[in-house]
Amino acid sequence: MKTLLVTGFGPFPGWERNPTPAMVKAVQRLRLPGVRIVGHVFNTVYAEVARDLPALIAKHRPEAILLFGLAGRAGHVRVEMHAHNVTTRRTKDASGAFHASPEIAEGAPWRVATAFRCGPLAARLRRAGLNARPSPTAGEYLCNFSYWLALDAVARRQAKRALFVHVPLPRASGDLMRPGLTRSLGRLPTQADLDRVAVIAARAIAGR
């Protein structure tokens, strides 16, 4: 039986509401023949992600790793094509710490790409009525950090493929737009919409 590891994050400074734990649960409710689904929600802390993600990969030996994160100011779902070898010095993690160094891995390449085809998944999400686009960067915070670790596991042949999907903050009931976002972005998603994103992405990375 193949294993799919799916992860999300808890709250972090400035964003006390994170929709990704519910997305992980939505994937865990799936029944995919021949696929065992393992879910995990990280505290948004560098030291814990650095410890727990490699441990989860070593324990479960997943064929695929699907990671979800919040891009609170985004107006659409971002299917991330790359992780970058950089960490932010602007925002501390939920424990109040920065990463120990500006780079994730000293001497490693500046950027690594997923082999998963992001364009077709974004198109599949759009066909389902969800506003999604491929994205060239997963940022500089813990989302990017976790993606780098997952892609490193793929490079080490500890998993076959990995993908990170960033999602906007879902709107509250009756709230169509958030201040600062233009109407060209369209209707912002609900939590139910984001759960659909999670299910479609999980099916895609599992080859379904």
Image: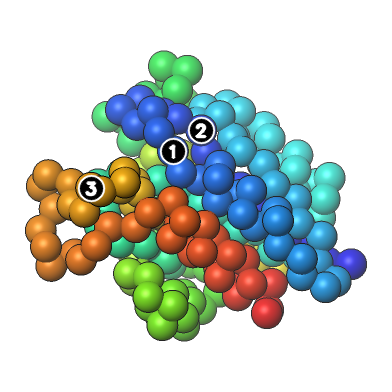
Foreground label between 2 and 3: 3
Whole-percent x and y of residue 163?
55, 62
- Which residue type does callout 1 highlight? Asn
What residue sits 42% from the left and 65% below the top? 79
Q: Residue furthest top?
A: 96
Q: Is residue 140 above or below residue 198?
A: above
Q: Residue at x 37, y 62 (%)?
A: 78
Secondary element at image label 1: loop
Residue 134 can be seen, yes or no: no
* Among numbered discs 2 and 1, the one appearing first in the sequence: 2
Q: Quadrant of residue 91?
A: top left
Helix, strand or loop at mark 3: loop
Labels 2 & 1 near each other (Cβ < 8 A): yes
Question: How many numbered marks are there?
Answer: 3
The answer to whether the residues at label 2 and label 3 have Cβ atoms under 8 Å apart is no
- Whether residues under marks 3 and 1 lie with C-beta atoms below 8 angstroms apart, the answer is no
Q: Which residue is mark 1?
A: 18
Question: What residue is shown with label 2?
Answer: 10
Q: Which mark is residue 175?
A: 3
Q: Quadrant of residue 5?
A: bottom right
